[in-house]
Image (cartoon, helix red, strand yellow):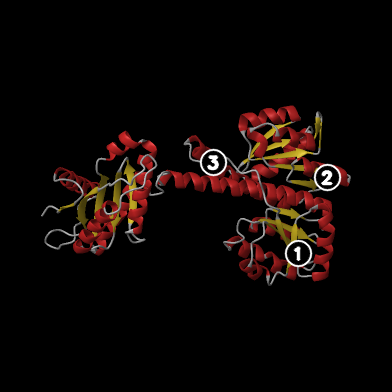
Amino acid sequence: MQGKVLIVDAIATNRIVLKVKLASAYYQVLQAASIAEAHRAARDHRPDLIITALTLPDGDAASLCAGMNASGKAQFTPILAIGTPTDTQTRLATLAAGAQDVMAKPIDDALLLGRVRSLIRAHNALAEWRMRDDTSRALGLAEPMATFTTPSRITLVCADSALAHNWMHRLRTEFPSKLTIAHPSEALGSFQRGQPPDALVLVLPETPVPALETLRLISALRANTETRHAGLLVVQTAPDTALSVNALDLGADDLMTDGFDPAELGLRLTALLKRKRMSDQLRQTVRTGLRAAVFDPLTGLHNRRYAMPHLARITEQAAQNGRPFAVMLADMDHFKRINDVYGHPSGDAVLVETARRLRSSLRSVDMIARLGGEEFLIVMPGTSPEEARAAASRLCHQIGVTPFAIPGSTDPVSITVSIGLALGGLTPCGQVARDETADDLVERADKALYAAKTRGRNQVNLSRPAA
């Protein structure tokens, strides 16, 4: 199925006709005859889109939108209103209440299905990010969404400069924001040079050929890293159903088919920017959650969840290209004493400074991870045995040569580290090692670390691979 659509209309014939059109396009169709029935259906079946009549037995489309927006789980479901031509105020009130569009009868089937595809596609994309955000929050990995927003930046993309300036002047009274104008041929270049817009209003010329040329800009805008997440609203200066459907299928977020109306354009931009901010914030919280999943929050180093798959990839690559690499396990000596004598904040300060010193002594290509407690894993790809020994000795020196300033002590405290070193990628005879796994290497490094501890600490011990 393409998606699940709830039709809300008191007239059964209207519901049946619309159901046939949608079912033939492989949508699953639900039906309701009133706002009360629509709420029950939305709660029980979670539709991807609601198509409603403008007038209902227990209210109107605006009432339905308001109720859905306040109903929790159904508040994000897009709503498309359909009715006979009515006064402008009813249309604007329905849009202001939260409807994504108001389509007047008679409706072109191709345009209706184009609208349905566009709305469900946007709904599913946002639902996917919300699901990821819910997962991050369940894991305790996401931060609350920010409520402060900077003024929006809107760019009017229009080939007719006089028309664009006229529209921009009239739009300012309905939609106070930072408005700029760009010619279609120069739009992408101007976005590269400055801060990208939050939304673009793409104005199509009246004649079909120039309009089609302008419409092709949508694909470029969606492919561009600076503008791919910008809201995109297309305004047609002349009705053309084929262009309307094309615009929606190319990726336009919204569409005005009947020309410029500043009040309606302001409402649509407000809704578009609200959805964009929500999408931006969801992506950010998911990125925050992903970062928290693979980074240690105290030191900023990678954690075990990231480190072991990374080491596995390095091991596989070494088996293919024959390049040696080094694996180190570094463990702070007598670290428990720091926590016991000076307190856990002092222990945390030692770990943070240790991480800083390790980073400053290694290459950017090297991977450092905190495995837990006071133990660190270091992976150095493309490293010869001689280079690995020198690097391990340098790390020992970097930790032990300068005492640590910690909050629980007036005097700096001397701290040392022991390192177990394992070499991967080559056998003792210089052959390419193909059977050793990441776990094998960590086990060898761990045994070498244990030997370094038993031999007096503050030293490097090398584990050699089996013959």
Foreground of the two, 36 or 110: 36
Residue at which label 1 appears:
204
Distance from disc 3 to disc 1, alpha carbons, whole Å, reads 41 Å
Secondary structure of the residue carrying numbered label 2: helix
Residue 53 appears at what percent x and percent y?
Answer: 78, 38
Quarter holding residue 251: bottom right
Q: Can residue 92 be seen in this view?
A: yes
Secondary structure of the residue carrying numbered label 1: strand
Mark 3 vs 2, N-terminal side: 2
Q: How crowded is mark 3: few (under 14 residues within 10 Å), some or many (20 or more)?
A: some
Could you say which disc has been placed on residue 91 in the image?
Answer: 2
Quarter holding residue 447: top left
Residue 138 appears at what percent x and percent y?
Answer: 49, 35
Q: Can residue 305 be seen in this view?
A: no
Q: Residue at x 67, y 59 (%)?
A: 197
Kind of residue indicated by mark 2 = Arg
Residue 337 appears at what percent x and percent y?
Answer: 28, 37
